[in-house]
Image (cartoon, rainbow, N blue to C red):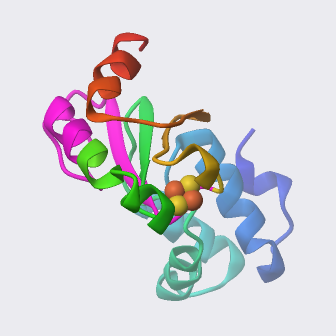
Amino acid sequence: MDILSTFSRDKSKLVAILQEYQRELGYLPEEIILKVADYLGMSPSTVYSIATFYPRFKFVPSGKKVICACRGTACHVRGGGRVLREIEKKLGIKAGETTPDMEYTLETVSCMGACVLAPAVMVDDEIHGQMTPQKVAEVFSDE
Ligand code: FES
């Protein structure tokens, strides 16, 4: 069943509809933005600008695993920058990029609410604390 058919043509449903597509596809391709805009009688640019307001919506596909390195102050002062550089070296990509084989996406966040574990890195939903450049290899060997 198509996602749109489960929603009324009510503009207030926009975010809920986008969430459903994000959950199913992992991101919001342009054709989905156009389709939702048409369904709700909104301009695609309005739908896109509302969607970009929410950090949880992605507009390009992510890798199978999402690695998130913290760039917050607590993590930074405890060596988070070195950990991030080691992950970038290990994956051969920079923060914000996805490996060409679509295995990993590397993101950063300004705090993941785990400052006591600084520096922290999240692999999908699992937090790895007290990270060091040496521990990066261990985290990836578990994958
Ligand atoms: S600053 Fe890194 S978890 Fe808070």
Q: Is residue 93 magenta?
A: yes
The quarter of the picture where residue 31 lies is: bottom left
Name the residue at 36% across, 54% down: 60
Indicate left or right for 70 with 43 as reference: left
| Magenta extent | 85-112
Q: Left of 98 or right of it: where is 127?
A: right
Location of residue 82 with respect to 131 vertically, above or below = below
Q: Quadrant of the C terminus?
A: top left
Quadrant of the displayed image that contains ligand 1: bottom right
- The spot of residue 118 in percent (x, y) is 51, 48
Task: Residue 72: give x, y in percent of width and height.
Answer: 46, 65
Q: Residue at x 66, y 84 (%)?
A: 41
Q: Judge from the rendering whether residue 30 lies leftward or rightward of residue 129; answer left or right.
A: left
Quadrant where the N terminus sits is: top right
Q: Quadrant of residue 117?
A: top right
Horizontal side of 62 relative to 32 (left or right) equals left
Along the line of sight, the residue nearer the viewer: 73 or 40 = 73
Residue that lies at the very extreme toward the top in this rendered image: 142
Q: Position of residue 137 (x, y in %)?
A: 28, 20
Q: Nearer the viewer, residue 31 or 67?
A: 67
Residue 124 image offset from top left, x and y in percent? 54, 34
Residue 89 belongs to magenta span: yes
Q: Residue 135: name its quadrant.
A: top left
